[in-house]
Image (cartoon, coloured by chain):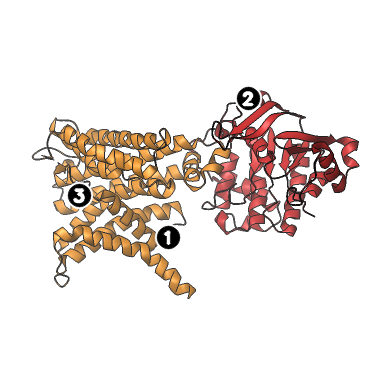
Chain colours: A red, B orange
Amino acid sequence: MIVLDNIHVVFGRGTPLEKKALAGVSLTIKEGAFTTVIGSNGAGKSTLLGVLAGDVIPVEGSVRIGEADVTKLPTAARAGRVARVFQDPLAGSCGALSIEENLALAYKRGQRRGLKLALGHHRRKLFRERIAELDLGLENRMTDRMAMLSGGQRQAVSLVMAMMAGCDVLLLDEHTAALDPGMAEFVMKLTEKIVGANKLTTLMVTHSMRQALDYGDRTIMLHGGEIVLDVEGNNRRNLDVEDLIDMFRRVRGQTLDDDELLIAE
Amino acid sequence: MSQIALWGAVELGLVYAFVALGVYLAFRVLDFPDLTVDGTFPLGAAVTAVLIMAGVNPWFAAAVSMLAGALAGLVTAALNVRFKILNLLASILTMIALFSVNLRVMGRPNVALLSVDTMLTPFYGNGLRDFMVRPLFLLVLAIVALIVVWRYLESDAGLAMRATGANARMARAQGINTDRQIYLGIALSNALVALGGALFAQTNGFADVTSGVGTIVVGLAAVIIGETLFGTRRILIALIGCVVGSIVYRIAIQLALSSDSLGLQASDLNLVTAVLVTFALVLPRLKRGVLSS
């Protein structure tokens, strides 16, 4: 379970550019729930993910992941609980290291790293099997540098990496946004399969309203650092993209510019 | 070039192989341009010389040198990590400070190691000429150092260090404390360089406060020559490249300086080094240019 309680995040505090990124967000996510997060640019989506990951430490409020209060823990110290896939395919893996070395890094996420060989016989076999499940033929390229893979392949491997070690929450930060439509579709199907099979508590930020409704079981919308919409169950099932936009207008009491909400598809 | 000159070049190359391994850790693994080594090389020499003159076991003296080098590295890492000073500048500050520290350690600009036992003493006089014993002894030590560094970089802990240099944000997301990796890596790097300094003092019979000038360039030259000759794909190959690169560099310098037709003299060493490093840096680019055009 994840509990965010009255989270306030302010960037550039005390400067003329001070910006309130999150203004008192409270959110409880049940174990095993798949929540999608939408909102316009600057709404606070990435900040919300950052607060969970540890990249952003809130000025007020508390963060609980699983059993632990992680409010003040830096990224590295809570990595054992948090698996992530970044928007930028280059960000989530080491381009200079091989596929299997990246997997070895992920295999020990949040654990003590000792002097044991990172790529022993047993691990190599395990990594190969996991990569073979992708059906991309990458199992024959285990010693290739990650940099030689396409963006989509890298995101697919990143998802496998996220699953190498256990986690209390999976954070997906627009992880298909940088991909071509075909590969984005592949990565989304893969995501759904992995999340379903492992019953993972998942938070997925997306720019696509379609994606936000098609995947997961709960959708929240952020605007100006606040949660302005939170739907699940039947209410959500009956929604389509048009309704989502109408709802957004009603809640905010203002009309939207086309470029304020990027609606893919 | 005479046979003695060749063995001499190999010997010096092997001393600087330790510098090259250290520079590889800092520059290539951690992506941390660390000029501290210009200070830690003579620091290692100074500590060893002073301790040996005080009657300390030469092996133990070399170990203390490594510790001193590691401490110097920790200072640079702290300036960078703790106080957010740009890595290059942080290392220059430590380097400058070490010049004074080295003078303090020795009490004078140089210390001669005359008529005292060194690590090499037991190996002399067993049939081999002295000028051959030194490089062979150094080769064994360099291989040991290479294997230790290699095995470390292939371990989970070493992989964490490599990830820190390759993609720090990703490393943190994997639970790696990147600050700690920088402390550890820069300390290890400077310990190796100080060991090079200690071996320099023991093989050459003196420690001099000015012997550190250009250490970084020589180390980098070895790394780059190694990469040009061997490539960078595998860690072991890259490390062997460092050691061989260091030897090749010394032989190239020796050839350039001893060739009458070039008309170079010993004082041209730094110029020759700069030209050689530039050449090694530009060569891979030229090769690419030829291939692509």
Vertical order, A77 against B24 (above or below):
above
Same chain, labels 1 and 3: yes
Q: Are marks 3 and 2 in contact (CB under 8 Å)?
A: no
Circle 2: residue type: Glu
Vertical order, A188 against A73 (above or below):
below
Q: Secondary structure at mark 3?
A: helix
Q: CA distance from mark 2 to mark 1?
A: 51 Å
The residue pinned by badge 2 equals A60
Residue A110: image quadrant is top right
Earlier along the polypeptide chain: callout 1 or callout 3? 3
Residue B49 visible (yes or no):
yes
Asked whether B92 or A194 is in front, the reply is B92
Which chain is mark 3 on? Answer: B
Which chain is mark 1 on? Answer: B
Q: Report how many numbered discs are placed on residues in the image.
A: 3
Asked whether A12 or A221 is in front, the reply is A12
Q: Are marks 1 and 3 in contact (CB under 8 Å)?
A: no
Q: CA distance from mark 1 to mark 3?
A: 29 Å
Q: Residue at x 35, y 40 (%)?
A: B90
The residue pinned by badge 1 equals B231
Circle 3: residue type: Arg
Circle 1: residue type: Gly
